[in-house]
Amino acid sequence: MSQELYDLVTVGGGPAGYGAALYAASAGLKVAVVEEDRVGGTCLQRGCVPAKEFLETAATYRCVQGAAEFGIETSPTRIDFGVSQSRKQQVVDRLTKGLAGLMKGRGIDIFDGHGTYKGGGAVEVSGGETLQGSSIILAAGSKPRWIRGFEPDGESILTSDEVLSLTRLPESVLIVGGGVIGCEFASMMSDLGTTVTIVEALPSILPGVDAELTGVLLRSFKKRGIKVKTGVGVSSHRRAGKLVAVELADGSEIEVEQVVVAVGRRPNSDGLLAPGSSVEVDAQGFVKVGPGYETAERSVFAIGDLINTAQLAHVGFAEGIAAVKAILGESAAPVDYTRVPWCIYTHPEIAFAGLTEEQAAEHGVDVVVKKDLLGGNSRARIIGEVDGFVKVVADAKTHQVLGVHLVGPWATELLSPGYLAVNWEATAEEIAQFIQPHPTLSEAFGETVLALTGRSLHVG
Ligand SMILES: Cc1cc2nc3c(=O)[nH]c(=O)nc-3n(C[C@H](O)[C@H](O)[C@H](O)COP(=O)(O)OP(=O)(O)OC[C@H]3O[C@@H](n4cnc5c(N)ncnc54)[C@H](O)[C@@H]3O)c2cc1C
C-alpha cells in the first residue's frame, strides 16, 4: 500500500471536481482526482452534453420537416435513432478524451476507483492506494432519484441514464416529473415522433420559472400533442401486454411503451465517508457545508450536486473555484444562488437569471417590467420562429435590472448579456446606450432595456 502526498485531492471527476482540479492546477497546486467512472461526470457522460446532443437531433429534424416553407423539397423525414445515439457517443467520447488530456497536461493525477474519505486528509482509493491531501474537495455528485414501485428496470421503467443510452425511441412514453430534465426529454422525444404525456405532482411544470415563460412552452407542447397533467402523481404500474399500464393518483390509467422517471437527483454520499471523518451529511444525504463550502472538518470542502445547492454544472464550476480560492487563502465572492443562469433546452428554449415578477412581489420589491415579443423581431421572422419574448424586470425607482427572462429560439445563447446585467447590478440607462447588432435576436434584449428608460424604438 502506497501513500501519495498532494496539495489537493478531489473525490469525483465531474464538472465540480474536475473544474476545481483544473483551477487549482493552474494556480500551481499539486492535484489528484479520484474518479470511479469516466472523467466528465454526469454532465458529460449522462447529462447536459448527451441530452443536448439529442435535442439538437430534434432541432435538425424540425428544420428538415420545415424546409418546404423555404422552397426546399425533402423526401419524407425519417429518424434512425441508432445513428443519433452513435453520434452522441462520438461527441461524448471526443470531449472525454479532450478533458482527460487537458487534466494530464496540467499535471493532474487521475486515480481510477471509488474514493472514501477517511478523515485527516486521507482518501482511500478502492484497490488499496491511499492519497494524502493537505486539502480535500468532495465532489461525488448525484444520481437519479426514483419513486418507490417505479424502480428502473432498463426496459419499461427508465431514468435519464437509460434514456440517454437508447438506440430506438419508444412509440409512447409517460414522463413522471415536469422539471427541467422531464420537459427536455418530452420536447426531444415528441419532436422525434414519440407520443408523450407528462405527469407532475405539483400544480405546474417547471416550478420557479416565470409563469409567462412556462405558458409559451405549454402552448407549444399542446400544439405538438404533448399532454401535460399537473397536480397528480403516479401510484402503481403493471404490464399490459407489450405496454405498461400506469395508474395515477386520481384513479386514471395511461398505457405507454415506456415510463421515464425524472423526479430529481440524490447526492452520491453513500460509501463516501468512513467513520474516521467528521464530515456531516443531512437527512437527504447532502454533505453539510458553510458559506465557503467548508465541511465540519478543517481543510475539507464539498461542492457540486453533493451539496444542497442548484444542481447545475456551471454552479459546480463556480463552487469549485470558490473552494480553491479559500484553499489558496484568497477571498472569494460567494455564489449568489438567486442570480445564477438557468437554461432549459426545450423547444422553445427558456433562459433566465434573477428575480421573476412574482419573486419581486414576494420580496416586497416595487418593480417595473418591459417585454419585447419576438413577433416584431426581424431575425425571428427570418428563421420562422416567432413564439417567444424577452422580459426584463427592473427596480421601479433605480431601474437596476433585477431579472431577465427569455423564451424562444436560442434563448439559452441569448441569456449572457442579461446575466451580466443582473449580476453587474447595471441599470437600464447604463445598458441602453450600448448597440445591439441588426438583425439579431439579441436586439430584443436591447429594445426591452431601452423601453425601461421611458423611451423606445419598437417596444410599446
Ligand atoms: C439529463 C440531464 C441533463 C442535464 N442538463 C444540464 C444542463 O444542461 N446544464 C447544467 O448545468 N446541468 C445539467 N445537468 C446537471 C449536471 O449534470 C450536474 O449538475 C453536474 O453534473 C454536477 O456536477 P458534479 O461534479 O457535482 O457531479 P457529477 O457530474 O455527478 O460528477 C460526480 C462524479 O463523481 C464520481 N464519483 C461519485 N462518487 C465517487 C466516489 N466515492 N469515488 C470516486 N468517484 C466518485 C462519479 O462517477 C461522477 O463522475 C443535467 C443532468 C442530467 C441528468
Image: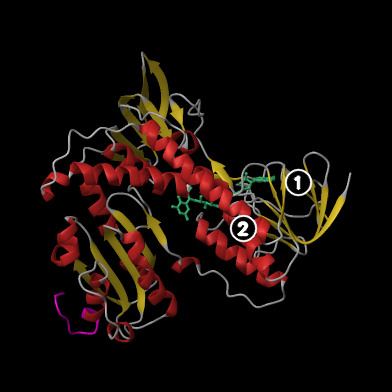
User: Mark 1 is on which residue type?
Assistant: Thr
Q: Is mark 1 within 8 Å of ligand 1?
A: yes
Q: Which residues are magenta?
A: 451-460
Image x and y of residue 85, in percent: 42, 36
Query: Viewed as shown, does residue 460 lie left or right of 78?
Result: left
User: Mark 2 is on which residue type?
Assistant: Leu
Image x and y of residue 288, in percent: 66, 57
Q: Is residue 365 above or below residue 20?
A: below
Image x and y of residue 336, in percent: 51, 70
Q: Residue at x 33, y 69 (%)?
A: 404
Query: Viewed as shown, does residue 218 lie left or right of 165?
Result: left
Mark 1 or 2: in front is: 2
Q: Residues within 10 Å of mark 2 (few under 14, many from 20)?
A: few
Q: Is residue 19 above or below residue 130?
A: below
* Predominant secondary structure, magenta span: loop
Which is nearer the eye, 348 or 149? 348
Q: Residue furthest right?
A: 1
Looking at the rendered structure, the number of numbered marks drawn on it comes to 2
Residue holding disc 1: 116
Q: Quadrant of the C terminus?
A: bottom left
Which is nearer the eye, 295 or 135? 135
Which is nearer the eye, 435 or 82? 82
Res 11 visible: yes
Q: Is residue 145 above or below residue 279?
A: above
For numbered disc 1, what is the local secondary structure? strand
Coloring scheme of the render? Answer: secondary structure
Residue holding disc 2: 102
Asked if residue 299 lies in the magenta stretch, the reply is no
